[in-house]
Amino acid sequence: MTDPDDKTSDETSEKPPEPVSRREFVRGVLRYAALGGLVLGSGALLGWPRGRRPDFECLTGAACPTCPSASTCPLGGRVSAQNTVWQIDPDKCIQCGNCATACVLKPSAVKCIHEPTVCGYCQPCFGFFDPQSPDPTVAAEGQLCPTDAIRRRLVTPPYYEYSIIEERCNACGKCVKGCNTHGNGALYLQVRHDRCLNCSECAIARSCPSGAYVRVPANRPYIRRPKSSSSSSSSSSSNQ
């Protein structure tokens, strides 16, 4: 006689899930799509912090301003390029002064850089002295830098070595303009990445009149000026 409490293995095993109808499947997809749109839309309504919108998934890895898919991109230019950072091209920079005022950081993440391989170690350096001053001296009234961020040291007469105190530099570009106008261009502006937030929509890049702000590989974040052509030509002539 069979015990009524003795259940067979077929009866105790779990029943397979019932198939989902096409209508229920489509309804589920629409439900999740609506939920995703609500999450993204809430960010647009609340407003992301200026210049710091979140990094979305980018499939091209190109900088938004130069991306060939920018006009059709569903992200609308809201994503920073993958593995790239902002930097200033020294050959395009016109020292307009926007780097000092447009950056979201105060003081600016942009600092003046001194390139020793280009510097002429001039005694009357016009990145240091104010060329408009009737009596250029090392006193504050004779210097071009408004924040006293440049130091000079006598190497051997008449050559002087110059250095930048970055904590004092406000990225005004006055010393850079003087050096580029009257010297070898050994002073130039660069974005310092120990400070820069790498904003997707850089405020300085938007206001740069010369297009000097570009995206560069994150593993090569600085654009260094090469050795001066005069020194290269003199060294090549001496070897002949």
Image (cartoon, rainbow, N blue to C red):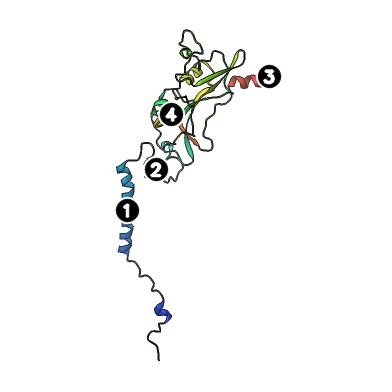
Relative height, residue 75 to residue 189 (above, below) = below
Circles 1 and 2, Cβ within 8 Å, touching? The answer is no
**Residue at the image point whose x is 35% and y is 40% from the top:** 48
Quarter of the rendering containing residue 16: bottom left
Q: Is residue 59 left or right of residue 33?
A: right
Residue type at mark 1? Leu
**Residue at the image point whose x is 53% and y is 17% from the top:** 183
**SS class, disc 1:** helix
Q: Is residue 202 visible?
A: yes
Quarter of the rendering containing residue 72: top left
Sequence-wise, which precedes: disc 2 or disc 4?
2
Q: Is residue 111 left or right of residue 39?
A: right
The residue under label 3 is 238
Sequence-wise, which precedes: disc 1 or disc 2?
1
Sequence-wise, which precedes: disc 3 or disc 1?
1
Residue 54 marker: 2
Q: CA distance from mark 3 to mark 4?
A: 43 Å
Sequence-wise, which precedes: disc 3 or disc 2?
2
Tell which tag, 2 or 4, sits nearer the viewer. 4
The residue under label 4 is 108
Residue type at mark 2? Pro
**SS class, disc 2:** loop
Sequence-wise, which precedes: disc 1 or disc 4?
1
Residue type at mark 4? Ser
Decide which of 22, 84 is in the foreground and name it: 84
Residue 80 marker: none
Q: Is residue 90 visible?
A: no
Sequence-wise, which precedes: disc 3 or disc 4?
4
Q: CA distance from mark 3 to mark 2?
A: 55 Å
Q: CA distance from mark 1 to mark 2?
A: 19 Å
Relative height, residue 17 to residue 31 (above, below) = below
